[in-house]
Image (spheres, rainbow, N blue to C red):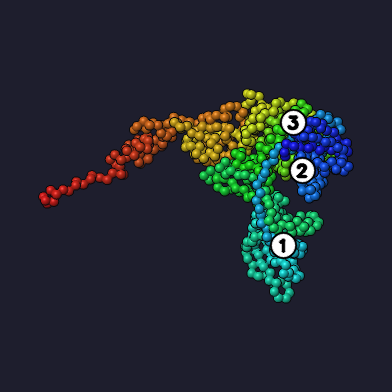
Amino acid sequence: MSARKTLLLCSCDQSQTFSPEQLKIIAGAEQVLSVDNLCTDDMKLAAEHLSATNDIIIGCGQQTALFERLADEIQDETGHSASLYTIDLRDRAGWSAGDAKPARIHAKQAALLAAAQLPQAMAPIKTIESAGICCIVGPTDRAIAMAELLKDDLGVSCVVSDGGPIQLPSDAYDVARGQLSDASGALGGFELSFTNLETLNPAGRGALRPEAVQASAKSSCDVLIDLRGTQPAFPAHHKRNGYFWADPSLDGELERIALTARERVGTFEKTVYFKLETALCAHSRAKQSGCTRCLDVCPTEAIFSAGDFVEIDSNICAGCGSCAAVCPTQAVKMTETPFENLTRAMDTLAKTYRDQCGENPRLLLHTPAGEKAIQHNARYGDGLADDLIALGMEHVDGIGHAEMLAALAAGFSEVLILTDADTDSAALAPQLALAQAMIEGAGQARTRLQIVTAEQLSVAATHSSRTGDPVLLVGGRRDITRVAVAAMAPSDAAPIALPLGAPYGAINVNADACTLCLACVSLCPTGALGDHPERPEIQFTENACVQCGVCESTCPENAITLQPQLDLSKDALNHRALHGEEPFECIGCGVPFGVASTINRIVEKLEDKHWMFTNSDNVQLVKMCDNCRVKAQYHSENSPMAAGTRPRVRTTDDYLDS
């Protein structure tokens, strides 16, 4: 929005109050006007300013569609309409519990208004083509009924799973019999596999005759409708665009599906929700398995292994953000709600609220469905607690430990997450447990981070409103996590033990088993492991370790174990020796090479115990560097490279004497 702004506030029939001058400053508005019924009696005021040149901010979210239609009408009539932005100040702030403090309400309104003006990220868009080729699988009666509903809009093929009678063949759709065995893809690109497939010949009288049975067959389609009544063909099937699954327990499913499915033809825009940097991925190295965190949490199976890194199918990805929340190297970043934008919004909300009323607020993270619960609670219940600021996002299952800790670091006294379903809570549980372990290890109460229900939104804070000074939220997820926990913990805090699988920790090396082959060093994807330039030694930088496990799976001696923990001391930022030995000095030239214990162990195992090293000086070769070993072998009497005595060169005299 431009610098010239007009702020329109509505008390909603005098059911809420404002601090107009305070909001004028926060919005950077040229003028602020407050009325009682902007959507009815005072509609002319909205129309007047929408016809003007200033950008318009309306503090009402409920009637957004009404004001947008009004702006469109003015645009059609006059050829000009002011830029319009609406924000919900009523349900999220104005309508709070009866004992709410006006100072807190006004501070929350100011915080919401300040955060609403932050620049939003623009996610890239891709196009998907659908020719409307539709495959319906299921029992005969339901499949044919669905085909009759869609035949005029889509190109339909039915693969029925039983032997039910088909009364009359239709030229509007094809029919075959078979069993769906596998499915992949999304709208515009489904790939299907069938077993025992037999096409039905419509020619002749009587029942349709089956053709030869194919033990296996493959096909493709743009839209897939699953009426089998069994488990869906895809995990998180409701997030798979172009796939429709009929719940056998519900009535009217065919009509509901047909209403939406017939619209899945044409060119569609799809958001590319992620940005993947494979160079940062710690999934694998040299076929040694490592981090699989994103693969483990993806609800749609859009992520798959591609050797040393993972790949993500943008057609399948639903943008939940779970992968970015658990990725320890930031190889995956979300484009719709980047971590940096989210932390900036948190910082703005907390700082504005604190500046206005001198207290620390609590944060509520919610989805669009959660927003409806907030609106219902505001109108028919007590409304949000006056210190609880709501921040909406598309998916809460993409909230990771870093986001939770960033909110605490910004100055929020608690972080509450309103989930839509049990599946969201299950996805959040590991990240919540990790963040709670960190703050508990720092001496804070675990209840500062929690998942809540809609019934808990009106509960006032029971803790002290002061939680310490906020910290600067700069850097990536790991940087902010470390700074946030360090700000809560005492300066001499011991390393905090973390749950198994945490992306922070140390590495323990069994010195008795380690041979210092340095295989772990060569394959470490983050550079946490290194070697010493002058002696055999494994060096380790704990802050860089993501506990991917590549070193553990690589070690031929099984000498490495992972230890999940968060070390807040400066030692974690510097490299330290995990295990090292003195090098062996070549008996020929004195140059250090190899590991002394390894050379001595080899000599001990071979000397006078192997036929090649019995009654010979061959064991001395083991004690030499590469250069000296080659020279010794070349000059040895038994050298395999010796060519014997060179023949004397014949001269002219030799020929004359003969």
Q: Position of residue 573 (x, y in %)?
A: 57, 29
Element class at badge 1: loop
Residue at 61% across / 34% down in the picture? Answer: 504
Q: Amino acid at mark 3?
A: Thr
Residue found at the very far front of the displayed protein: 78
- Residue 83 sits in which quadrant? top right
Front-most of residues 396 and 12: 12
Q: Position of residue 219 (x, y in %)?
A: 64, 61
- Residue 121 sits in which quadrant? top right
Q: Give the vertical position of 441 relative to 553 (above or below).
A: above
Mark in front: 3 vs 2: 2
Residue at 75% across / 64% down in the picture? Answer: 152
Can see residue 485? no
Which numbered circle lies on residue 105? Answer: none
Mark in front: 2 vs 1: 2
Element class at badge 2: loop
Q: Could you classify mark 2 by the number of other residues whose Cα lies within 10 Å: few (under 14), some (14-19), or many (20 or more)?
A: some
Can see residue 572? yes
Element class at badge 3: helix
Q: Amino acid at mark 2?
A: Ala
Q: Amino acid at mark 1?
A: Leu
Q: Earlier in the sequence, mark 2 or mark 1?
A: 2
Q: Earlier in the sequence, mark 1 or mark 3?
A: 1
Residue tagged 3: 352
Residue tagged 2: 82
Q: Could you classify mark 3 by the number of other residues whose Cα lies within 10 Å: few (under 14), some (14-19), or many (20 or more)?
A: many
Residue tagged 1: 154
Mark in front: 1 vs 3: 3
- Whole-Å distance between the Cαs marked 3 and 2? 27 Å
